[in-house]
Amino acid sequence: MNLVSDLHKFLVVVDYAKAQNERKHRSRTIIFKKVSRASGDENCPVPINLKAFTFNDLKTATKNFRPDSMVGEGGFGRVFKGWIDETTLAPAKPGCGQVIAVKVLKSESHQGHREWLTEVDYLGKLRHKNLVKLIGYCEECENRLLVYEFMPKGCLENHLFRKGVEPISWSIRMRIAMDVAQGLAFLHSKEPNIIYRDLKAANILLDSEFTARLSDFGLARNGPVGDNTHVSTRVVGTSGYAAPEYVATGHLTQKNDIYSFGVVLLELLSGRRAIADERAGGVEETLVEWVKPFLLDNRGVFRIMDTRLGGRYPKKGAQAVAALALKCLRNDPKNRPTMDEVVASLEEIMNMSKNIAETSSPVISPKKLY
């Protein structure tokens, strides 16, 4: 009798473990359901625009994830450079075929796994010239990897803030601003609209021609639908870029992205980070807080301009960009422009400066450092 009872208990435990495993598998694949329906195969959770790589494929493509192949590292994990055949997408020898960037997620990161799924979901479906192209992914055992087109110029953050890097010109900065604006406008135009939620210089990648593309969609969310005015969510993102009303309430709207774009415009103008590297009196001052007093009059913009530009920018263009940034940073989100309006404003600014050479403007050292 005891043997039967023990056997029964064992089977119950096995059934429970099996059920838990099935639930875990369903949670991993549920985010692909909409894509699999579009492909007509409910049993296949593979995104229709992506290749499912094996872990061994990516080991070969990156020279076994050797240190000299690593091109970046962050809280999510590491990024390695690799090569694949342009046609078959099979691993290729270094220097042959298509260059790729392979992001390897830390295996112990549960939050990172959710963001990995979100990124596969969005970039598996979205295609736009100003969004980084996700080529494929790998999900084997505890391994989670993403495979992107390689962006040889790296991220905007390095070009603006890293010492020893040649400064980018005014015209390139304006092109980058337009590229980012068009990428966000595309996301906001989708149905339902998509809120990027993590716009920052580190997430703006640059190709060989300095074309900018938005990357890292792990924090993206669908926007409000129907009569809803916002999406309620936990506050995530990067300090210095997030809109104040979102930080205070967790209410997410497209206007949060507009605010973040205003911060990026200030970074392009000033060459300064959204948050100061150093603390004054133990209190961090944001770029927005530092800039606003200087922009109370038109000439104040020259006190915040990146000195590495050497004064080579059109005065009226700089003033117009500063004015646009202030509109994006308005305290009341209802008074901020839409992303389409931002694109239109940037087009006017760029057309205004098109026939004007980047003449020397005064280089004025700011009286106050943040």
Image (spheres, rainbow, N blue to C red):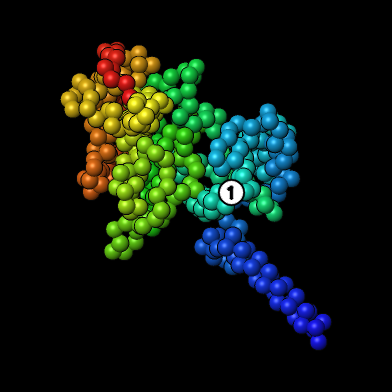
Amino acid, disc 1: Ser
Quadrant where the C terminus is found in the figure: top left
Task: Report the side of 104 relative to 353 (left or right).
Answer: right
Q: Is residue 3 above or below residue 333?
A: below
- Identify which residue is drawn at 29% across, 14% down: 365
Q: Percent from the top left, x then y, of residue 126?
A: 48, 50
Q: Percent from the top left, x then y, of residue 59?
A: 72, 41
Residue 359 in view of the camera: no
Q: Quadrant of residue 346?
A: top left
- Identify which residue is drawn at 42% across, 44% down: 237
Which of 167/242 is in front? Answer: 242
Q: Residue furthest front?
A: 2
The crowding category of the residue bearing disc 1, from other C-alpha atoms within 10 Å (few below 14, some 14 to 19, many at least 20), is: few
- Identify which residue is drawn at 68% across, 31% down: 67
Q: Percent from the top left, x then y, of residue 361?
A: 27, 14
Q: Quadrant of residue 325?
A: top left
Task: Report the side of 354 relative to 164 (left or right).
Answer: left
Which of 6/54 is in front? Answer: 6
Task: Report the side of 53 relative to 252 (left or right).
Answer: right
Q: Residue furthest bottom?
A: 1
Q: Percent from the top left, x then y, of residue 21?
A: 66, 66
Residue marked by disc 1: 109
Residue 65 in view of the camera: yes
Q: Is residue 32 above or below residue 94?
A: below
